[in-house]
């Protein structure tokens, strides 16, 4: 899968923020494998992090699932009333907050996947 990616870091105290440089979110352009590899590097370099998520900016191209990674889609519910989370073993859950939707997607897929970094994709 090819996309632009941002890395979202989550600390042990569940504080989340996007990896930034000079006040702007860091964006990577490339495959999901490259984004996840970078996420793993960031996770291993900072012991205070609980997880690092590779979040696509816009809709990725050439989307596919593998046995090590499950695809989770997060998209607007409509009329600004929240976000829907769908994916492997997740059937249309509704969240008011995008960050809560991404947290659930990452937590739910972590139990299924062997990867320590999570990949979530937000459709806009």
Image (cartoon, rainbow, N blue to C red):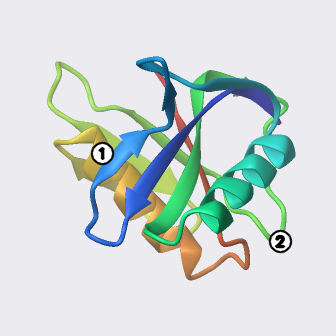
The correct choice, above or below, for 54 with respect to 25 in the image is: below
Determine whether, in the image, residue 3 is placed left or right of residue 72.
right
Residue 117 visible in the shown view: no
Residue 48 visible in the shown view: yes
* Residue identifier under label 1: 99
Mark linked to residue 67: 2
Residue 54, quarter of the rendered image = top right
* SS for dot 1: helix
Q: Residue at x 36, y 42 (%)?
A: 17
Q: Of the residues under marks 2 and 1, which one precedes in the sequence?
A: 2
Determine whether, in the image, residue 98 is placed left or right of residue 70.
left
Q: Residues within 10 Å of mark 2 (few under 14, many from 20)?
A: few
The correct choice, above or below, for 3 with respect to 13 in the image is: above
Residue 100: x and y in percent read 27, 52
Residue 30, quarter of the rendered image = top right
Mark linked to residue 114: none
């Amino acid at each position: 899968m090819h996309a632009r990616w941002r890395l979202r870091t989550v600390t042990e105290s569940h504080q989340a923020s996007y990896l930034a440089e000079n006040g702007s979110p860091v964006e990577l352009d490339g495959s999901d494998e490259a984004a996840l590899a970078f996420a793993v590097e960031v996770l291993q370099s900072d012991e205070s992090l609980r997880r690092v998520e590779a979040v696509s900016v816009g809709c990725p191209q050439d989307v596919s699932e593998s046995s090590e990674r499950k695809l989770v889609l997060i998209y607007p519910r409509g009329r600004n009333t929240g976000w829907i989370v769908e994916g492997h073993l997740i059937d249309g859950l509704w969240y008011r907050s995008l960050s809560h939707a991404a947290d659930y997607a990452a937590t739910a897929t972590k139990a299924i996947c062997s990867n320590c970094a999570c990949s979530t994709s937000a459709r806009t």
